[in-house]
Amino acid sequence: MKVFVISDMEGVAGIVKWEQTTGGDPMYEEGRRLYTEEINAAVRGARAGGATEIVVMDCHGAGKAWSFNSLVPDLLDPGCDYVVQEKWTEYTEFLEQGCDAALFVGMHAMAGAARGVMNHTVSGQQWRNLWFNGRLVGETGINAALCGTWGCPVLLVTGDEAVCAEGHELLGQGLTTVAVKRGLGRFSARQVPPLRARGLIEDGARRALGDPKAVSPYDPGRPCEIRVELTTTSAADEYRHKAGVEIVDSREIVSRADDWWRAWQQFFF
Ligand SMILES: [Zn+2]
């Protein structure tokens, strides 16, 4: 069984502040160690659940050369491969080859989510809301749509309670979730300590893989319209000359295509 571990940093147990997730900040080294060990727990669980090939893809934009490069290489479980992307959603090879399941680890809730620890969608500064065919989504939705493009179901979401609820809402009750914190505000939470969180995630990954049919691959629908509400007019400016992308309001853009992947590629890359 081929398993794709897609991960972010804000939903990791022990992480509640930007200073823990921003490359170069003093607290970042602690954050990336917590992150890497949580990924290792998911890799162990995946293996126990029957995975024979595991690829990990970091999707956290930590800034500069740390973007999509936050995992500490020599702390990673030797039983996985890992991908460092230059641009988010760039790597699709493993999905194209036919991947059996995806596990989302360390996720955060969409921008505006009440009690969503460090909630945002893609860019806290530039993006306010994102819709796929009229449905409000966050980064779980983006990564799930990416996997769904090649028929790969998402079986596990871990992070805070808000993103677990978001995952269930989008992907259904067959989704396995592991909440490692409950947000009090955007930068405060009651948390499970990392040592216990890793055990929960290992167990969650193993259980999730027990029923690969529990969740259907996510398809936002065909044709597909991606709508982004930005925070400033200057954020919209960069889309002025992109084929297939329409600026429908001074701060709102729409990308339409036959399917989600085409609509995503023509505005995001
Ligand atoms: Zn992130």
Image (cartoon, rainbow, N blue to C red):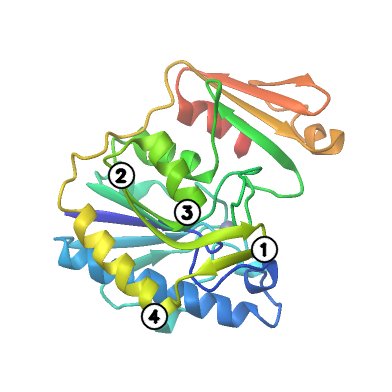
Residue closer to the observer: 47 or 239: 47
Q: Label 2, on which residue?
A: 175
**Circle 1: residue type:** Phe
Image quadrant in which the C terminus is located: top right
- How busy is the neighbourhood of tag 4: few (under 14 within 10 Å), some, or many (20 plus)? some
**Circle 3: residue type:** Glu
CA distance for labels 1 and 4: 21 Å
Question: Are circles 4 and 3 on residues that touch, CB within 8 Å?
Answer: no
In the rendered structure, which disc, 1 or 4, sits on the residue that comes first in sequence?
Answer: 1
Q: For this view, does 8 lie left or right of residue 45?
A: right
Q: Label 3, on which residue?
A: 161
Answer above or below: position of 56 versus 135: below
Q: Label 1, on which residue?
A: 187
CA distance for labels 3 and 1: 14 Å
CA distance for labels 2 and 3: 14 Å
CA distance for labels 2 and 1: 26 Å
Question: Are circles 2 and 1 on residues that touch, CB within 8 Å?
Answer: no
Q: Label 4, on which residue?
A: 195
In the rendered structure, which disc, 4 or 2, sits on the residue that comes first in sequence?
Answer: 2
Answer above or below: position of 146 versus 18: above
In the rendered structure, which disc, 3 or 1, sits on the residue that comes first in sequence?
Answer: 3
Residue 222 image offset from top left, x and y in percent = 42, 17
**Which numbered disc, 2 or 3, marks the residue closer to the eye?**
3
- Does residue 226 appear anywhere in the picture? yes
- Does residue 80 appear anywhere in the picture? no
Q: For this view, does 171 lie left or right of residue 113?
A: left
Helix or strand or loop: what does disc 3 sit on? helix
